[in-house]
Image: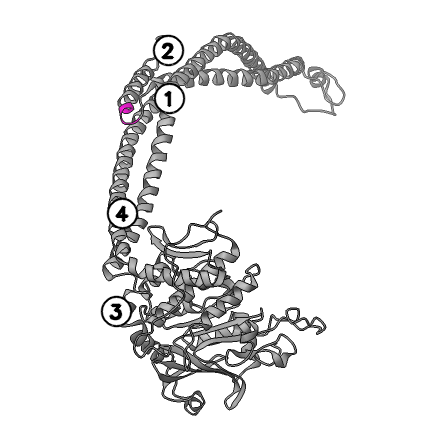
């Protein structure tokens, strides 16, 4: 693809420093790790300009014979975290690593000499827990060990940074909630986490770093507003308008969810009513026009439910149930009466038979009593009396025997009558039962039929009433849906107007982004080649970084290059004095795996070109495993060499437990 020739050759990277801007507004002169007070483990001196902390990879150096020696695990990332810890971040490592370091360094400290607007500050912070933090102006860190009972906290340094560098005006613009979060947000940008891999211009802190940075809970929109505030590319009016637009955007989501809920409710309720009325969806117009048609159909169905069967009297269902219960009781009583009679008849017959069996013997006893005989000699009493008998003089009681005989006859007569009456009762009951059962069955059938008809009519009536109630509820839900749609439309209109106003505000900041694009483009061209170009734009969708190289490129390496070039471009603007950031930058292992080594090295040539003769207006610290360009593998650029093995070559000079 042919490249369109440019009328004017782009200007090379050059920064015009403001008066008095020959030194960074904030830079770190020295970082020291202490095993305990008075016993430094490692002290790393830094300078304004380009600084390398290098952990060589043996393979890159052509040496693969050292067993266990690695370019990783030497402490580069821990160095970065300790440095930003000394600049005000709350944590210097994930929890497990902090515990290990705290165990190995029970009385350990980390200190930094920070230069702010030309004035030195001493920072001393513990590596363990339970001790105070110190930030004091005009002294050396070693002097702070003499006043360990007088902790100041980090507030003095952070207050000074926010007043002298960020400024109170910009601090007030920052979209943060807590005191000192304005600087901590800026610090997160200036010292990106290695875990973010330079994937996005607004990715500053990874959750796994456990840094407690306020940026971890900030949305991309708030991070972008913070970035624009720090580069003087947003005004208080735009900030307020953006906050209102963001709030309305959240409300719009709520209203859209509400409208979707009412829409779902209306559609499902309408479907249920159509199914209940047995109507196809096409039989009723859509929307509010169909509500009256649904109501008319529901009233017709309700009228049909009010009709009854002429052959069944359901006017007094309870009276019919009472008659059926009475008829069933008659059948029950007759069945019980028959069962009792059938069980009593054999008993009565048995008793009658026994009585009848006693009657002949009793009759003989009466006859014998009328002509009594001696019980011993069996001689008639009359003869014995006439002739005389010396053996017996006792005679039977004739009256008593006659009385007993009469009673027995009476009992036989009564029991015989009782047997006859029981038999008559059995016969009569047997004759009544069929008719009683028929009457009961007829009434039971009538009750069941009447109940079925009543239930059917009641169900149909209830369903008809429910249909009318559902249609009334559908009408209310439809009104709520329309109201929610109106609110959504009104909010959308208000947001669109605010977006137009925000676009106008962004147009007013075109000069800032134009200057940023000039630096960004110059860095891209210097690093990639004269056929490449870069541009930074801001629109309603956010900030966009573009690299043109035979068309717009967007690979993993190009994305990381964009982020690095953007940070360097902002650093150039900070050197120029047009941002509210110090010209300070810390990049932890910025080279992605597929970023060309030549491009990576040319980036440092670009930065080196910004250095002054005696001092530099910026401080750029890079930790790297990839070897720096040969020219920078020496002082003053190479500040420290760390190795993964042996332990004495690591940052902390020991193995952690």
Q: Nearer the viewer, residue 67 or 222?
A: 67
Residue 220 lies in what quarter of the image? Answer: bottom left
Mark pair 4, 1: CA separation: 37 Å
Name the mark on residue 169: 3
Percent from the top left, x then y, of residue 309?
36, 10
The colour style of the image is one colour
- Mark earlier in primary sequence (4, 1): 1
Give the extent of the magenta segment.
287-291
Name the mark on residue 312: 2
- Mark earlier in primary sequence (2, 1): 1
- Mark earlier in primary sequence (3, 4): 3
- Mark earlier in primary sequence (2, 4): 2
Residue at (54, 73) in percent of width and height: 76
Name the mark on residue 495: 4
* Vertical placement of residue 260 versus 101, above or below: above
Q: Circles 3 and 2: CB distance less than 8 Å?
A: no
SS class, disc 1: helix
Residue at (28, 39) in percent of width and height: 484
Magenta-colored segment: predominant secondary structure = helix
Mark pair 3, 4: CA separation: 27 Å
- Residue 290 part of the magenta-drawn span: yes
Q: Nearer the viewer, residue 421 or 148?
A: 148
């Amino acid at each position: 693809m042919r490249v369109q020739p440019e009328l004017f050759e782009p200007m090379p990277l050059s920064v015009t420093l403001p008066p008095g801007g020959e030194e960074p507004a904030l830079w770190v002169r020295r970082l020291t790790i202490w095993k305990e007070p008075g016993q430094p483990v490692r002290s790393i001196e830094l300078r304004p300009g380009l600084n390398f902390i290098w952990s060589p990879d043996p393979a890159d150096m052509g040496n693969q014979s050292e067993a266990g020696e690695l370019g990783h695990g030497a402490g580069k990332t821990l160095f970065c975290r300790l440095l930003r810890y000394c600049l005000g971040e709350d944590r210097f490592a994930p929890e497990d690593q902090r515990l290990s370091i705290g165990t190995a360094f029970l009385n350990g400290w980390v200190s930094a000499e920070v230069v702010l607007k030309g004035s030195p500050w001493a920072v001393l912070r513990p590596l363990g827990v339970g001790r105070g933090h110190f930030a004091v102006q005009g002294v050396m860190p070693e002097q702070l060990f003499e006043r360990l009972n007088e902790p100041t906290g980090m507030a003095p340094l952070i207050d000074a940074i926010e007043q002298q560098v960020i400024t109170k005006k910009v601090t007030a613009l920052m979209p943060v909630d807590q005191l000192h979060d304005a600087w901590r947000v800026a610090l997160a940008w200036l010292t990106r986490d290695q875990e973010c891999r330079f994937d996005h211009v607004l990715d500053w802190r990874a959750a796994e770093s456990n840094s407690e940075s306020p940026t971890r809970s900030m949305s991309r929109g708030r991070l972008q507003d913070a970035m624009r505030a720090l580069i003087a590319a947003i005004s208080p009016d735009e900030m307020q308008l953006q906050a209102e637009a963001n709030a309305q955007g959240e409300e719009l989501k709520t209203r859209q969810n509400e409208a979707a809920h009412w829409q779902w409710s209306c559609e499902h309720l309408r479907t249920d009513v159509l199914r209940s009325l047995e109507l196809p969806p096409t039989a009723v117009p859509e929307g509010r026009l169909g509500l009256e048609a649904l109501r008319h159909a529901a009233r017709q169905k309700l009228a049909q439910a009010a009709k009854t069967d002429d052959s069944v009297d359901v006017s007094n269902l309870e009276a019919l149930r009472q008659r059926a219960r009475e008829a069933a009781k008659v059948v029950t009583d007759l069945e019980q009466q028959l069962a009792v009679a059938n069980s009593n008849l054999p008993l009565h017959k048995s008793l009658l038979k026994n009585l009848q069996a006693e009657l002949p013997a009793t009759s003989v006893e009466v006859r014998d009593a009328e002509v009594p005989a001696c019980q011993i000699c069996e001689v008639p009493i009359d003869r014995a009396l006439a002739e005389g008998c010396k053996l017996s003089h006792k005679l039977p009681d004739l009256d008593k025997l006659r009385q007993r005989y009469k009673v027995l006859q009476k009992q036989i007569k009564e029991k015989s009558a009782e047997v006859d009456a029981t038999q008559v009762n059995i016969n009569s009951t047997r004759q009544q039962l069929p008719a009683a059962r028929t009457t009961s069955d007829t009434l039971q059938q009538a009750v069941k039929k009447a109940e079925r008809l009543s239930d059917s009519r009641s169900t149909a009536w209830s369903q008809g009433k429910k249909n009318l109630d559902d249609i009334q509820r559908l009408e209310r839900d439809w009104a709520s849906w329309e109201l929610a749609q109106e609110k959504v439309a009104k909010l959308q209109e208000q947001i669109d107007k605010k977006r137009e106003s925000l676009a106008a505000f962004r147009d007013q900041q075109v000069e800032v982004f134009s200057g940023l694009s000039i630096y960004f483009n110059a860095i891209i061209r210097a690093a990639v080649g004269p056929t490449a170009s870069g541009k930074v734009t801001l629109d309603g969708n956010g900030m966009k970084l573009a690299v043109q190289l035979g068309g717009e490129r967007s690979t993993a390496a190009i994305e990381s290059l964009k982020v690095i070039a953007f940070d360097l471009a902002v650093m150039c603007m900070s050197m120029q004095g047009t941002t509210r950031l110090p010209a300070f930058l810390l990049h932890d292992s910025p080279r992605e795996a597929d970023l060309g080594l030549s491009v990576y090295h040319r980036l440092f040539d670009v930065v080196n070109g910004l250095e002054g003769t005696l001092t530099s207006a910026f401080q750029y610290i890079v930790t790297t495993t990839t070897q720096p360009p040969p020219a920078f593998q020496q002082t003053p650029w190479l500040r420290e060499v760390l190795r993964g093995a042996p332990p004495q070559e690591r940052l902390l000079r020991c193995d952690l437990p």
